[in-house]
Image: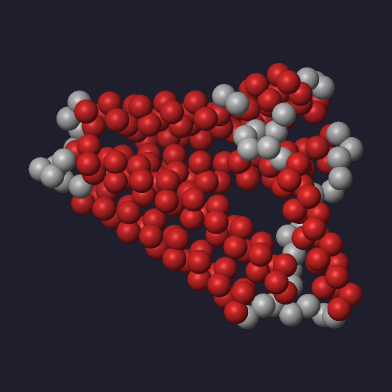
Amino acid sequence: MIVTLIVLCEIAFWVLLAGGLTLRYVAKKPRLGAAVLLCEPLLEVILLVVTAVDLKNGAVPDWKHGLAAVYIGFTVGLGHSTIRWVDARVAHRFAGGPPPVKPPKYGMARAVHEWRVAGRWTLAAVTALALLQGAVWYVGGDGDVASLRSWQQTMLFVIGINLVIAASYTVFPKRGPGREQEQEQEREQQQEREQDTKKVSGPPG
């Protein structure tokens, strides 16, 4: 049941995203589109409640409950950036918006980008860790929590990998073909920062 619900939540996420952006850019109803996108967090709430009820009813914690926590965590950490990524491309394609800003390729600009990516993945993993720990406490000391602990170890690995990747771009920055290319990357980085300041937390509206 839990796995089926996770699949349904993922399908519903993309259906709501497609519907919200269609209303915003194709139907020219931005407020209604934003309202649809604001429904997406409800999917994670439903999954969290169903998982908690399943455990309360005596279900033995296994990989499925861990997967639910990980799915919620990654939706929290990566869901907003996914919406922004899709929104920028739909706006460019259907509403005459500017071309999506490409990530910088060289130098410290690339390092900053990688740290931002690592930050999002770390947020996702930390959220999952917190939910998994909550499940461990919820089950209590007498329950079998080995599968939940295994998911926690995986999340720590995810954090470590992302930090190593970001640090490698900082310690060993990728060199561009020349000064002109570096200036171009700096301009792209500035555009990315400007776009971030224009986005409010939550779905685009």
The residue under the point 42% across, 51% down is: 126
Count of marks placed on residues? 0
Q: Is residue 67 visible?
A: no
Image x and y of residue 134, in percent: 29, 41
The residue under the point 69% across, 67% down is: 110
The residue under the point 80% across, 28% down is: 25
Instruction: Using the image as rendered, state which of residue 105 and residue 107 is in the foreground.
Output: 107
Lateral position of residue 143 relative to residue 80, left or right:
left
Lateral position of residue 40 relative to residue 144, left or right:
right
Instruction: Using the image as rendered, state which of residue 131 and residue 146 is in the foreground.
Output: 131
| Quarter of the figure with the C terminus | top right
The residue under the point 50% across, 66% down is: 163
| Quarter of the figure with the N terminus | top left
Lateral position of residue 113 relative to residue 187, left or right:
left
How are the residues colored? secondary structure
View extreme (left): residue: 142
Image x and y of residue 159, in percent: 45, 61
Lateral position of residue 145 relative to residue 32, left or right:
left
Quarter of the figure with residue 150: bottom left
Image x and y of residue 86, in percent: 70, 41
In the depicted structure, whether residue 154 falls above or below residue 95: below
Quarter of the figure with residue 19: top right
In the depicted structure, whether residue 187 falls above or below residue 128: below
Q: Is residue 29 visible?
A: yes
Instruction: Using the image as rendered, state which of residue 30 and residue 71 is in the foreground.
Output: 30
Image x and y of residue 48, in percent: 38, 31
